[in-house]
């Protein structure tokens, strides 16, 4: 299945001149770390400046996603301000969720054009590291969305522990335990019916080969497929080594201290949901002066509406 999917995705990149956005039979989903989208200062974090908010809106207006999953959203009022501002500019999201976690500064959120028919807020998830009880800082946003009454999918929006060192435990160990929590929920969802349209997306704060990312992805029958969206810049050269991915531009995050560009934001789907993927609608949104909005770039995936 994965080999088949990579072939399809490769040809989808060749068709990357197709304009983004949803058609009548297409569902577009976006994940976006909006870097401290705050409407009030808190714990040393400043209010998001107006020009940065405007840049966020410009990106979202260009993408026109049906569902947007946010990381580093501020309090509920910040989400509602963004929702209201987008509506004034012609992009309306009737449905929304704001998920709290152990962190009281930044949160997870979702805006949707389609009804959210089930919501499970995992706001008090915990784990052990070195015998010490710790909490998943941003919780986990767990939703089921119904699209036009004929397609349903589960969306898990997550923001794993950053790579910033802290004194209480090793940050890599913390991130791995959080990834294991996500994986357990994925396995529970897939075991519920044997077949389920399921998507895990968000800021995993680690590279493809790292243990936390591999943990979330899983393997075998319950393994998820990493969509690996890339810039729509015309790249079509295949990988020089069949074990590697093609050399397309997939980075999602700029780390200024190391002057590095990395892919740490992901969209992964179950094998069932992969059947509906529209490869030409999967991309990393690239625009001039992208960093005005956030240190992350939006990642987009598109699906045909209806089980295949």
Image (tube, rainbow, N blue to C red):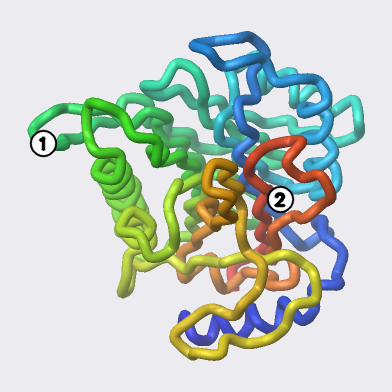
Question: Is 77 rendered above or below residue 5?
Answer: above
The answer for how far apart the CA atoms under marks 2 and 1 are is 47 Å
Q: Measuring 45% from the left and 48% from the top, which residue is drawn there?
A: 204
Total tally of numbered discs in the picture: 2
Q: Which residue does the numbered mark 1 point to in the structure image?
A: 130
Image coordinates of residue 251 in percent, x first then y, are 61, 59
Q: Measuring 67% from the left and 44% from the top, which residue is drawn there?
A: 67
Q: Nearer the viewer, residue 178 or 165?
A: 165
Q: Which residue does the numbered mark 2 point to in the structure image?
A: 148
Question: Is 199 rendered above or below residue 131?
Answer: below
Q: Nearer the viewer, residue 232 or 46?
A: 46
Image coordinates of residue 29 in percent, x first then y, are 66, 51
Q: Residue furthest front?
A: 258
Q: Is residue 55 left or right of residue 135?
A: right
Q: Measuring 69% from the left and 58% from the top, which residue is drawn there?
A: 284
| Mark 2 or 1, closer to the camera | 1
**Within 10 angstroms of label 2, few (less than 14), some, or many (20 or more) residues?**
few
Q: Nearer the viewer, residue 161 or 30?
A: 161
Write down the quadrant of residue 98 in the picture: top right
Q: Quadrant of the C terminus?
A: bottom right
């Amino acid at each position: 299945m994965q080999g088949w999917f990579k072939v399809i995705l490769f040809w989808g990149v060749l068709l990357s001149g197709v304009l983004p956005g949803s058609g009548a039979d297409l569902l577009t989903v976006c994940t976006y770390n909006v870097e401290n989208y705050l409407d009030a200062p808190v714990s040393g974090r400043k209010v998001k400046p107006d020009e940065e908010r405007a840049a966020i809106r410009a990106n979202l207006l260009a993408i026109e996603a049906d569902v947007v999953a946010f990381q580093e959203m501020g309090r509920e009022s910040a989400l509602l301000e963004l929702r209201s501002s987008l509506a004034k500019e012609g992009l309306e999201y009737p449905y929304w969720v704001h998920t709290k976690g152990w962190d009281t500064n930044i949160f997870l959120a979702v805006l949707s054009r389609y009804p959210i028919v089930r919501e499970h807020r995992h706001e008090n998830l915990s784990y052990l590291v070195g015998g010490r009880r710790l909490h998943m800082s941003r919780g986990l946003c767990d939703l089921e969305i119904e699209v036009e009454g004929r397609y349903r999918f589960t969306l898990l929006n997550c923001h794993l522990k950053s790579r910033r060192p802290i004194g209480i435990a090793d940050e890599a160990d913390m991130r791995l335990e959080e990834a294991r929590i996500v994986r357990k929920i994925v396995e529970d969802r897939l075991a519920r019916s044997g077949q389920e349209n399921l998507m895990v997306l968000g800021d995993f704060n680690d590279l493809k080969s790292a243990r936390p990312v591999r943990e979330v992805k899983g393997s075998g029958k319950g393994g998820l497929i990493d969509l690996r969206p890339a810039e729509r810049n015309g790249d079509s050269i295949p990988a020089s080594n069949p074990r590697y991915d093609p050399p397309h531009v997939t980075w999602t995050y700029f780390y200024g201290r190391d002057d590095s560009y990395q892919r740490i934001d992901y969209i992964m789907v179950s094998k069932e949901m992969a059947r509906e993927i529209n490869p030409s609608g999967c991309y990393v949104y690239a625009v001039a002066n992208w960093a005005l909005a956030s240190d992350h770039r939006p990642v987009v995936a598109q699906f045909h509406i209806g089980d295949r």
